Structures are given as C-alpha cells and as structure tokens.
Image (cartoon, rainbow, N blue to C red):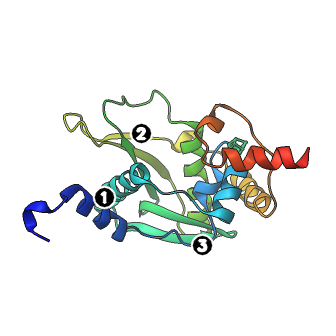
Amino acid sequence: MRMENLNIAERFYSAIERDRRERKAGIHVSDLIGPCLRQSYYRLNFGESYNRTTALNFWGGRKLHETPILREHELELEAYGVHATIDEYEDGVLVDKKNLFRDMPLPPQPSPQYIAQMEYYTVILAANDRPVMKAVLLYIPWFNLQVGPMEVEVTDQLRPVEVVRAELVSRAAALTDLPSRRIGDHCVYCQYFNRCFCVKMQQS
Ligand code: SF4
C-alpha cells in the first residue's frame, strides 16, 4: 500500500485492539459493585460487547492508570474467590484513580458504587496482609488539564471490614445462578437488555 493512502485512524484502532488486555477469568470486584448483579452474571457467562467507543474508553482508562505512584502498583490480588486489581498501595494507603471526562466537575460526594469498591478492596487487601488505614480516590481530569488531580479521602465512609467481607462473599455467591432483575434507569444502558427481557418473555 502507498503510504499516502494509509488510513491513520484505522491503524490507530487496530493498534489499540492489539494492545487490549483480556480480563482474567473469574469474578472481579467490578462485578459486585454495579446496581444489578444479573448484568454481571451475563457479562461473566456471555462476555462483553466491544466496539470502537468501548475500545477507546478502555485504552484511555488503561493509559491513565499506567504511571505508578506508590510502591505497589496495579497489584493483582484475590480473596474469597474474588479478584481485585489495586491501582496503588503503600504502607496502609490505598489509592484508586478515577477519570474525570471532559468538563465533568468533581462530584460533591463519591458515588455509593465507588465507596463499595473501596470497601471491597479494603477487605481483599486485609486478607493479603495489607491493612488499609487511609483510602483515597484520586480524580484525574483527562480532557481538562487546566485542573489538577483531586484527592478525596474516603476512609471515614467505609464500613467495618467484617461487615463488608460478609457482603462480598454473599454477592459473589449470588453470581453462581442467574440473579433477579434490578430494574432501574441503568437498564437503558445495559448491553444485555434484550437477553434479560427475552428470557422473561420465554418464561411467561
Ligand atoms: S436489563 Fe436491567 S435488570 Fe436486566 S440485566 Fe440489565 S440492568 Fe439488570
């Protein structure tokens, strides 16, 4: 092919596709924190659809996480049958990085989903001899570099480790069979919508 006919955008998408990392098999913390466990069940059993928008988001998110900050970086751990990739950990400090897209302001409160994620990480770290004394969400503005990274400490918002451990174990166990629907606004964005409601029609 003549170089002037080269479609650079196509080459870019092919390159990020090659660069993609497959998710380790099994249940991950991200499967336990969403509003609907049934959605996670579908993802675990039927896989995830992948298109150019999701490809770009995965790639951007991965690049954002690439630079190590603390001594233990992208730490892959497992406990109670659940996998976790911890962004950063050092001497009792847990840091999880979050993208802030475009002009998104810093949320007034971290979402319950992010808090649950930090709680589950705390339980898995504790089971791997890494107690958490301080938990921080580091919001990184991806598109608006005039704003610096923002640190939000969430330690006081985390529930006791024993309470969270029981919840983590029971949510992970719930993924062995098809969980009930949790119908809500999130269904509009669910990639398994047709599968979920087709099954209902077949059952009725
Ligand atoms: S459509 Fe709604 S209820 Fe069904 S799996 Fe998706 S999020 Fe859950």
**SS assignment at label 3:** loop
Q: Residue at x 35, y 38 (%)?
A: 101
- In the image shown, does 201 or 134 lie closer to the viewer? 201
Residue 140 % position (x, y) = 32, 43
Q: Which residue is mark 1?
A: 63
Q: Which residue is mark 2?
A: 152
**SS assignment at label 2:** strand
Residue 125 % position (x, y) = 56, 64
Image region (quadrant) for ligand 1: top right
Residue 111 % position (x, y) = 54, 36
Give the residue type that dot 2 points to: Val
Ligand 1 neighbours mark 1 (CB distance < 8 Å): no
Residue 122 % position (x, y) = 57, 57
Whole-number angstrom distance, CA of label 3 to CA of label 2: 31 Å
Q: Residues within 10 Å of mark 3 (few under 14, many from 20)?
A: few
Q: Are marks 3 and 2 in contact (CB under 8 Å)?
A: no
Residue 90 in which image quadrant = bottom left
Give the residue type that dot 1 points to: Lys
Q: Is residue 147 left or right of residue 132?
A: left
The residue most toward the right is 204
Q: Residue at x 39, y 67 (%)?
A: 20
**SS assignment at label 1:** helix
- In the image shown, does 143 or 9 lie closer to the viewer? 9
Whole-number angstrom distance, CA of label 1 to CA of label 3: 22 Å
Q: Are marks 2 and 1 in contact (CB under 8 Å)?
A: no
Q: Residue at x 44, y 56 (%)?
A: 93
Quarter of the C terminus within the rendering: top right
Ligand 1 neighbours mark 3 (CB distance < 8 Å): no
Query: In the rendered structure, which disc, 3 or 2, sits on the residue that comes first in sequence?
Result: 3
Q: Residue at x 57, y 50 (%)?
A: 117
